[in-house]
Image (tube, grey):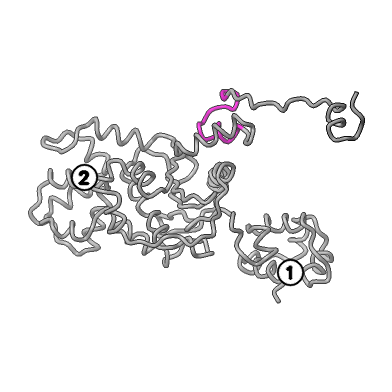
Amino acid sequence: METVGTRIRQRIAELHIGVPEKEIAASVGMTPDVLSRSLNGKRTFTSIELAHLAERLSTSMYRLATGEADPFEARIAARHEYDFYAGRYVEGKDESISQTLDNIELAYRQVYQGRNDALTPVAGPDEIREQLGAGFVGDFVSRVEEILDIDVVRVEGVTSAYALRAGGRYCIVVPRSGNWFRQNSDIAHELGHIYLGHFNDRDEAASDVKEGPAFDFAAQLLLPEATMRAVDWAKTTWLEVVNFLWDHGVSTKYLANRLRKLSLTARAEVWQLLELSTFDVFSRPLEGTSFSPFAVAARTQRAAERRFPEALIAAHMEAASTGKVAKETLAWMLDVSPEEIEVHPPQSASVNLDDLAAELGLVAKG
């Protein structure tokens, strides 16, 4: 039978901590002898010791105690940051990123009590595109929330997108920026993590096993192969390519990568356009476009706005007004000071102890 001590040693090995047990003991307020005896089953860990060890080993107390995943623990499909120089995803180590994700998880956990251990749905990009409907990229966030029932949070404090599950809700977190085309590909990529079943994997670290399929899912969702092959890229004009980029909500680089991936031949003028930044392509005057400069500005401004789902905000407003949850989380989501949120939770009516004692039969009335 696997013991708590065995699970702790396994977790230490998984993390490749590379420090003596005595240092781990000191970091959690235990003596080396006490930790050793506890690990060897000669002594039972206290709840406080398990809590400190769980924090030190970046896992849950529930997992250490039972060997199973905590059904209420927030889950992330793939913790990653993209290293543009190395050309690969790496595990994020920025403490501010972890803090932002923790804050989001807390916001969900405070008002939603759903479990996070149910198997996630599995679907292909073609099925999801059909559900989202034609022209979904123009209002991608709203379509994802209303049709797929997946929340989208847009905040500063993260440099890459994440898909997480907290309080039983799926949530995609994207960086706040003016690059709406980047946000579209980020959301599509995280939808890939969700619908490819990556939440069913206990390993949250990013890997080629997860990232490759998620990239392919996003590409097929935004730029379906059939659509790409239906265009004669050897004859298409500059204007047609610009309109194509707008209609599909992708960047010049994203389209260029898709053309290469599918080995499609394009005229030199197309490649010249795709070497430009997406911002320049949409900001420079061009007659005959299917969109206006104001439409571009609207997408850009929307992508730069801090955003939390209205349902989450409403749930926190109600919880704060009734005193169930402190208003600080709501203030953080709204990016305002707590003092600006004037909530006055109902106060419990004072109780006359003599009357209460009489009602309970502890003293005789009158």
Q: Judge by depth and name the residue closer to the eye, 141 or 239.
A: 141
Say which quadrant the N terminus sits in. Answer: bottom right
Q: Quadrant of residue 128?
A: bottom left
Q: Which residue is mark 1?
A: 5
Could you tell me residue 85's position as x and y percent?
40, 56
Q: Residue at x 73, y 66 (%)?
A: 20
Residue found at the very far left of the displayed protein: 235
Q: Amino acid at mark 2?
A: Asp
Could you tell me residue 176's position as x and y percent?
42, 39
Range drawn in magenta: 327-341
Q: Secondary structure at mark 1?
A: helix
**For this view, does 281 lie left or right of residue 337?**
left
Question: How far apart are labels 1 and 2 at the CA level?
Answer: 57 Å
Q: Judge by depth and name the residue closer to the eye, 53 or 67.
A: 67
Could you tell me residue 314's position as x and y percent?
50, 34
Could you tell me residue 151's position as x and y percent?
43, 45
Q: Which residue is mark 2?
A: 247
- Answer yes or no: do the residues labelled 1 and 2 have beta carbons within 8 Å? no
Q: Amino acid at mark 1?
A: Gly
Mark 1 vs mark 2: which is more N-terminal? 1
Q: Judge by depth and name the residue closer to the eye, 202 or 115.
A: 115
**For this view, does 291 lie left or right of residue 218?**
left
